[in-house]
Amino acid sequence: MKIESINKEVQEKVMQLLNDAPAEKKAEAIMQSIEMIQEAAHEDLVNQVVAEAERASHDADFKKQLGLRNLSQEEKKFYEGFKDIKQSITANQIDIIPTEIIDRTLDDVKKASPILNLVNMAPANVKKWIVASHTGAAVWGALTDSVKGELSTEISALNIDLHMLTAYLVIPKAIRELSLEFVDRYFMAILSEAMQDGLVKGYLDGDGKTGPIGIFRQIGTSNSDGTNKAKTVVTNITKFSPKGLSDVRKTLTNNGKRVVDKLYLICNPSDEAEYVDPCMYGEALTGGYVNKSFIDIEKIVDANCPKGKAAFTIAGYYTMGTTGVRVNEYDQTKAMENADLIIASCYANGRAVDDNVAVIFDVTKLEEYVLPVTQATIVQAGQE
């Protein structure tokens, strides 16, 4: 959640708090600022959940319409700890988030994020997950060592418990006092939001050292600092014509091993307006504008995509996973009067099956679509 997205009054309070804090109190001021920003950002959500809980308490039909989850005993025990976060965490009652919550949260994240909808999510609390590209190849005859060796090059294991993903969550007192199914409703909403932003950033440009290997990075090549090298930015994509996209499509097929019948174009909102839409849409003879792409191209616009760069990619060839998701109270700061700040952290990782899953290109090279003009010669009477 960016500070620019909250109201000016809260922005000013945050800036004042940070500016006035002495050096030895900076960490405390930063965490108090996070609490203020999170509370302001989720004020509407808090009010909505509280209002829903109040109405549901005397309207059985409305409660049914909300589709609240039936919580397991493990989930109930976890949320009971929210009634008194400090005491619960001290007593080690709030610790591992139940896997049901994580799996459902990741499902919600995939539905809410067009980018993460391209990703295969490994089940929660699985420490290793197979990453494999389905090649469609089958071999008759003896299973020789050479065949086994060839097949093994298509399969690798993703070590999910390799990197740490951390999110700061605020649980307001107004939420903690509700019945458990509404605590669940709020918690999953803010956890989804926090995880979505982190996972999207990791999917796009994770450096492979402190997080996943993003599609903007090479899988097997590293810099001297241990981060994965950035992919070469292609500069020859200027049109979305069959010839203009031929190299992209050949790359994405991974040397002809997979069929590519749909492309996903990930770009920055600014580049969408300046370069992508002018290239993709052209005037129709009957008026208005129509998509002039010869193949199905779905735009995914996200501010996490760097300006000037865009990616063509395909769905289902990138795997992410999380394991051991925990929550802890942030004890280096005094909690706000009506809220507690907790830290949710987990091991997480991700990578594509190969480098050919995405093509990174210079989006500024795209050319505006120009309607072809056909010049006709009209023969006048008497000039035959």
Image: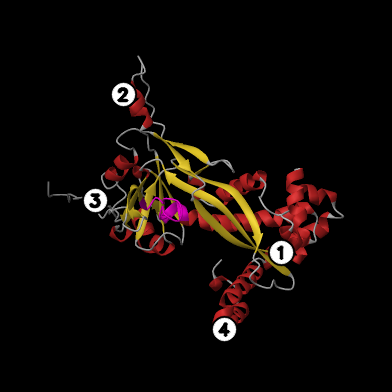
Q: Which mark is residue 374?
A: 3
Instruction: Tell which circle, 1 or 2, labels the residue nearer the N-terminal end.
Output: 1
| Place of residue 289 in the rendered image (x, y in percent of width and height, measured from the top left) | 40, 55
Task: Give the residue furthest to the bottom.
Answer: 20
Q: CA distance from mark 2 to mark 3?
A: 58 Å
Is residue 382 rendered to the left or right of residue 299?
left
Q: Nearer the viewer, mark 4 or mark 2?
A: 4
Instruction: Tell which circle, 2 or 3, labels the residue nearer the N-terminal end.
Output: 2
**Mark 4, secondary structure of its residue:** loop
Amino acid residing under circle 2: Ser
Is residue 254 rendered to the left or right of residue 25?
left
Q: Which mark is residue 22?
A: 4
Q: Which mark is residue 46?
A: 1
The quadrant of the rendering that contains the N terminus is: bottom right
Task: Please say if the residues under marks 1 and 2 sit with CB atoms less than 8 Å apart.
Answer: no
- 257 to 285, vertically: above or below: above
Amino acid residing under circle 3: Thr
Using the image as rendered, state which of residue 296 and residue 375 is in the foreground. 296
Q: Residue at x 64, y 58 (%)?
A: 190
| Place of residue 97 in the rendered image (x, y in percent of width and height, measured from the top left) | 66, 50
| Place of residue 134 in the rendered image (x, y in percent of width and height, measured from the top left) | 41, 32
Q: Name the residue beneath numbered marker 2.
A: 146
